[in-house]
Image (cartoon, grey):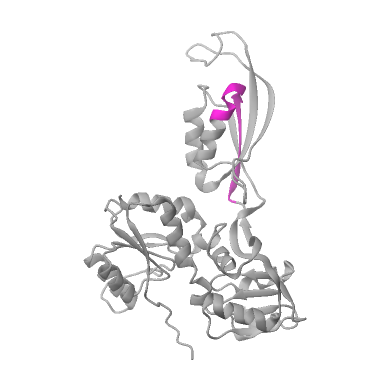
Amino acid sequence: MKLNYLVNFLENWAPLTLQEEYDNCGLLVGNDEMKVSAVLVSLEVTEEVILEAIDRKANVIVSHHPVIFKAVNSLTGKTEAERCVIMAIENSIALYAIHTNLDSIYGGVSFAMGTAMGLSNMKILAPRDSNLYQLVVHVPAEHTDALSKALFQAGAGSLGNYDQCKFSTNGKGSYRPLNGSNPYLGNIGKIQLVNEERLELLVPSWSKGAVEKALFLNHPYEEVSHAWFKLTNKSSNTGFGVVGELPSALKDEELIEKMKFVYGAKTIRYIPSKDNYIKRVALCGGAGIDLLSLAIKSEADAFITSDISYHKFFDAKKVIFLADIGHYESERHTIELIADHIRSKMTNFAVLTTESITNPIITS
């Protein structure tokens, strides 16, 4: 299998259009025409991870954090990132990063964090502004099912935990073919009446091109009557953080022990809850303290994230249980999330998870 197949698969899952402006996701090193022998999944790319890939004969590394983050003006090996890039090139190893785009999707980084905690009824905590279009198209009634199927396969009709969503209404369409036309039904110069359905479907911005192509390939008319509308509502499919429910309420000390076990956190910095009762929990993998106000607004009893500054803890005092479990700890389940997703479709090469502990922070 060529690398471009894997790249397209990952970007259909976590589109690059969802990455933050400051980020650098996608294929960072490598030729997308190269054949994939094995994939190694890691949280970041370090020299140890490169050596592990060489030892385990993996020629692709998929990491959450991009090894090339800021502009690189030279490759002299003065930093670990530069040395990693040099080692990757010298050993024909491709490097692919799936960072804030994976943070942003439904079922992404924070969902993996919540699943590990056993949360149910998870929803995105901070929905992004809509990346959605509404497609409206008129089609002969007998072609509705076939066209709908093609549009669904191209990426239309998904909303949250639902897919194949559409709205249709019946009506009469009319047109008069002119000279030079090639009508599906009717004769030149004569009015033609057709039983039609008006289909309305939601389409994410990253699927618009594929859906439009499917529309023109599968619609029977020579001229397709359709319209695109950009939506301004919030998207339930994309955004940062999650909020969900624990199976049963926990006391502060019980939640702390659960976090240490689930996330491998040796040290947890926290502000206690108002009443030592925690049932509804908000989470954000990585540095998510900017979502604190939304966690409070969601009526969560606790908010778990990382990289919290001293003064931010005051905003949670006597309001909400707030815990900093560490950046690596909050995202460690992302490794299996990525690996499992690749394994779900890719069966002709090995998908390995790193055995290297890439957390640079030592706690004792």
**What x and y, as percent, mark residue 305?**
59, 75
Tell me, yes or no, whether the highlighted magenta stretch contains residue 75: no
**What x and y, as percent, mark residue 340?**
45, 59
Q: Nearer the viewer, residue 236 or 190?
A: 236
Magenta residues span 131-146
Q: Residue furthest right?
A: 275
Tell me, yes or no, whether the highlighted magenta stretch contains residue 143: yes
Residue pictured at 54% horizontal, 47% vertical: 205
Quick check: 81 left or right of 223? Answer: left
**What x and y, as percent, mark residue 304?**
62, 75
Above or below residue 314? Residue 17 is above
Residue pictured at 54% horizontal, 39% vertical: 152
Q: Determine if residue 316 is in view.
A: yes
Q: Residue furthest front?
A: 248
Q: Determine if residue 307 is in view.
A: no
- Quarter of the view holding residue 306: bottom right
- Quarter of the view holding residue 25: bottom left
Marks counted in the figure total 0
Above or below residue 192? Residue 212 is below
Q: Nearer the viewer, residue 282 or 288?
A: 282
